Image: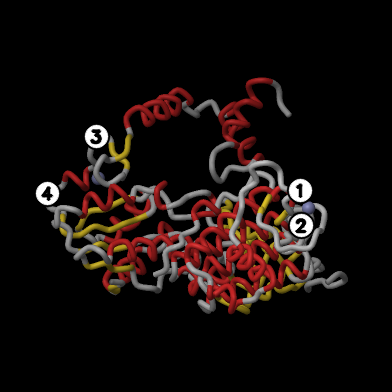
Amino acid sequence: MPGQWDDRGVPVYRDEAVVLRTHKLGEADRIVTMLTRQHGKVRAVAKGVRRTASKFGARLEPFMVADVQLWEGRTLDVITQAESLGSYGTLITDDYGSYTAASVMVETADRVTESEGSLQQYLLLVGALRSLSRREHAPTLTLDSYLLRALSVAGWAPTFTDCARCATVGPHHSIVVQLGGVVCDTCAPPGAPKVDAVTIGLLGALVEGDWPTAEAASESTRSKASGIVAAYAQWHLERGLRSLPHVSRESS
Amino acid sequence: MYEGIVQDLIDELGRLPGIGPKSAQRIAFHILQTQSFDVARLAEILTTVRERVKFCSICGNISEQDTCTICRDPRRDPALICVVEEAKDVVAIERTREFRGLYHVLGGAISPIDGIGPDDLSIRQLMQRLADGTVQEVIIATDPNLEGEATATYLSRLLTTLEIRVTRLASGLPVGGDLEYADEVTLGRAFEGRRSVS
Ligand SMILES: [Zn+2]
Ligand SMILES: [Zn+2]
């Protein structure tokens, strides 16, 4: 919000933010990378949070959603206040599978907003973290749905119905992640892997958020779909996602 | 930019954790200008510390011998193991004089976003230490932040398969903080009030 200053004449602004990650800074501070509702991605300093017993630090842990107030700094902004809007962190870390899924989500959100953040990416991430914290679905299903949708919003929408290359009406039986999803037999390069209809159905359900269909899928189908989603994400995000190989499929 | 070797010094100092370009420059000029500063001694200590200090082959704590002073001490209770992230947490807990068991230093916390999974920590070594039935209780004292809590969740799930009491330090530690900054009284109290997680 431009045009606001505190009583010392320092420009301040306020926004809702979800914490993507933190880095230690010096002896007691942290740099907090946040995706905000209105200001895109913001990197800001939280002073003293590693040393004090205040609630401030706990509100600025990854996966937390907070109403934050910041001072505009010359290099980095400084967080002066944080009020919790959703403490998903502890709920998520109580379940290891949810923790690994949420880690991939925040890394993805960080990467797809490299140039600029968007309200859609913000809402998508907050919704997915909230769903994880409430154990609404299996963590891997929530993650795969989030990945496909975050990539779609970023401009890499996959297709699991019509041919990704020539748009011939489906159903089709081959998936080539480099081409953007399913491809018809004419467009499929020789040796392109065939994928069964149930798995393709699950992928479509994950993009659309059709949870009854997703929940009905067997573990082996879910696992095949996850492999395709992972390949799709790693292909589109240059350098890949570091957290993705650490996703735990075991439920506790 | 300074010339040659002065800039090299600033660059090397700037690689150290917590030292930004300005601090690096300040330290470099202190070394250059302060006559009383014993450069030879610092250089010698740096070399010796690298040669002499290693990690304890049992618990992963820093040590000048194959095993650390705590693992070698017969007065320590071998039935209790306190699991911490780093060697500096051992120092913080020792200060409280509240704990008389042994330690296990994981070498960090599980942090997928940094590419660190369970296999990158000394969790397998911990399981080996627990195999012979000597240990009755494992106290998980990872940092009270997100990665520390997730590591505790992972460990407690893994350890429920064994017939061992697993406890976690009581809350009251500053959330989001580092264990090494917790004061002795708070940390001592956290030990007394530890709760079972399995
Ligand atoms: Zn085609
Ligand atoms: Zn030792």
Rounded to the nearest whole Å, what is the CA distance between mark 4 and mark 2?
Answer: 71 Å
Which residue is under mark 4? B74
Q: Nearer the viewer, mark 3 or mark 2?
A: 2
What is the crowding at mark 1: few (fewer than 14 residues within 10 Å), some, or many (at least 20)?
A: some
Count of numbered circles on the image: 4
Q: Is mark 2 within 8 Å of ligand 1?
A: yes
Could you tell me if the residues under marks 3 and 1 are in contact, i.e. CB atoms within 8 Å?
no
- Vertical placement of A238 versus A222: above or below? above
- Vertical placement of A178 versus A8: above or below? above
- Which residue type carries mark 2? Cys
Q: Which mark is residue B65?
A: 3
Q: Which mark is residue A163?
A: 2
Q: Position of residue A145 (x, y in %)?
A: 63, 67
- Which residue type carries mark 4? Pro
Secondary structure state at the residue bearing disc 1: loop
Which residue is under mark 1? A187
Q: Position of residue B94 (x, y in %)?
A: 28, 55
Q: Nearer the viewer, mark 1 or mark 4?
A: 1
Q: Is mark 1 within 8 Å of ligand 1?
A: yes
Q: Is residue B88 left or right of residue B97?
A: right
- What is the chain letter for disc 2? A
- What is the chain letter for disc 4? B
Q: How is the image coloured?
A: secondary structure
Asked if marks 3 and 2 fall on the same chain, the answer is no
